[in-house]
Amino acid sequence: MSKLKFSPEEVDILKEAYTLGHQGWNLDKLTPIKQKIKAKKRLIQGETCCYCLRDTTGEAKMVLDIEHILPKSLRPRNMFTMKNLAISCKRCNLQIKKTKTNFLTVPITQLPKRAFKSRFYRFVHPNLDYVESHIERVFSGRTKSRIVKYVFPETSAKGRYTYEYFKLKELEVDTANNAQGRRKRKTIKDERIRAAFDALTQE
């Protein structure tokens, strides 16, 4: 897939934003550029959240965030680095990850200039790792009662870390509860749904 290219005028705007530090991300002139980045990243990610892998097809633009994997407030130099940008849902970005950096294998202050190496990230990095090798989102059932399960190889520390870090168990239980016609339950009571849920882990 071709790289995202910017016109000379767009490059000037990006340079202006850099001079403002991470606050430059809010520059009004950047709006068309951010829309361009979002469209490209959604295409690359196949319309899924970069962390929980939920389908984002048809989602309103405001529901999805351009995620800075290394927070722009702590690493403004990578504010527009494409390897540092991805599309995530608000649950993963604003409710869970926020501006934390505890997923790094070294303190962010000790990251080298070339920080985009898989070994520096404990979770599956959407731009550096082959996601499907570490974790997959599988499902069964009809559209309105779809049961979701995340599966990852026992050998993938990144897959397990991603599952735990982004609290993906919650999403699994939510879909099972919806299939039962219930909400906000921590266990699956319906034996038929429970069996279907368990079967996903064996596939």
Image (cartoon, rainbow, N blue to C red):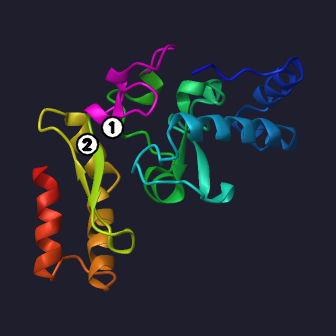
Percent across and percent down for residue 93 are 50, 51
Find the distance from the CA under tag 2 to the CA under tag 1. Answer: 6 Å
Q: Amino acid at mark 2?
A: Tyr
Percent across and percent down for residue 78 are 61, 26
Would you say 88 lies left or right of 178 here?
right
Which quadrant holds residue 9? top right
Is 125 included in the stretch rendered in magenta? yes
Q: Residue at x 40, y 48 (%)?
A: 53
The correct choice, above or below, for 150 with respect to 19 in the image is below
The circle drawn on residue 161 is 2
Q: Which element carries disc 1, helix, strand or loop?
A: loop
Q: Say which residue label 1 marks.
A: 123
Q: Which element carries disc 2, helix, strand or loop?
A: helix
Q: Residue at x 21, y 43 (%)?
A: 160
Considering every residue shown, the one lying at the far bottom of the view is 181
| C-beta proximity under 8 Å, tags 2 and 1 | yes
The residue closer to the viewer here, 29 or 7, is 7
Q: Amino acid at mark 1?
A: Phe
Q: Residue at x 15, y 82 (%)?
A: 190
Q: Residue at x 39, y 29 (%)?
A: 107
The residue closer to the viewer here, 152 or 58, is 58
Question: Looking at the image, is mark 2 or mark 1 earlier in the sequence?
Answer: 1
Secondary structure mostly taken by the magenta-highlighted segment of the chain:
loop
Residue range in magenta is: 111-133
Percent across and percent down for residue 159 are 25, 40
Is 173 included in the stretch rendered in magenta? no
